[in-house]
Image (cartoon, rainbow, N blue to C red):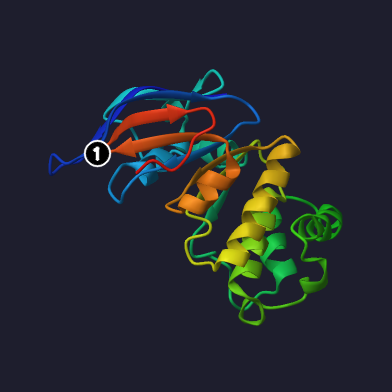
Amino acid sequence: MIYFDNVSKRYSDNSIALSEVTFQVAPNEFVSIVGHSGAGKTTLLKMLIAEDKPTSGQVFYESLDINSIARSALPKFRRKIGTVFQDFKLLPHKTAYENIAFAMEANGRSDAEIAENVPQALELVDLGDKIWNFPHELSGGEKQRVAIARAIVNQPDIIIADEPTGNLDPIATYEVVQILKKINDLGTTIIMTTHNKGVIDALKRRVITMDEGRIVRDDAEGKYML
């Protein structure tokens, strides 16, 4: 489904973010990407959603070269990918329902679809009882689960989770990881960056380790080796 073919990224100051990176992610995989700050993890994720372009090499989604997509076609392509961030990025003056509905509205979905799908997404992340709560009324873990519901409500093929547990306590971290596993079990590909050793060791899924822009390990059932 996803293939990085000898991808390098150099910036104008000659700093190297990625160097000859090659790997693939199969449909329905759960892949964790680990590495110290500056290892290239975030740059790699930006390549997937065409927020950044390789200096050399290619990034494919199925048979499509992502960097060949016309700017006008990018919104349609990005509907295939849901994103979850460390800082939630919820709209503070909208309820959980409204935050998720907003993502559907942006994709041109009908009022009937929104009314049906938003509650289902919240039930999937175990927040059906928080549907009308505002972000300031939710815990950190609950905010992240709303963010996950927002990412999945348009039924993307892939979820990109960039340090999704970085601001959470251990209990909330466990809950978020279990939800991501559940979403993966339902058929969605998950690509997650994390610094959390406990998360990696508990998942026992594929781990790609990066250092200074290169892949230095790729383990099918990896542990945190940094």
Answer few, some or many: residues within 10 Å of disc 1's Cα (few below 14, many 20 plus, some between 14 and 19).
Answer: some
In the displayed structure image, the side of residue 32 where residue 171 appears, left or right: right
Residue 23 in sight from this viewpoint: yes
- Mark 1 = which residue? 212
- Residue type beneath disc 1: Glu
Relative to the observer, which residue lies in front, 9 or 199?
Answer: 199
Q: Is residue 209 above or below residue 111?
A: above
Q: Position of residue 146 (x, y in %)?
A: 67, 63
> Is the C terminus in the top left, top right, bottom left or bottom right quadrant?
top left
> Residue 171 in the image: x percent, y percent?
62, 66
Residue 22: image quadrant is top left
Farthest left residue?
13
Which of the 4 quarters of the picture holds residue 18? top left
Residue 152 lies, in percent from the top left, at 69, 49
Front-most of 159 and 208?
Answer: 208
In the picture, measured across the screen, residue 66 lies left or right of residue 19, that is right
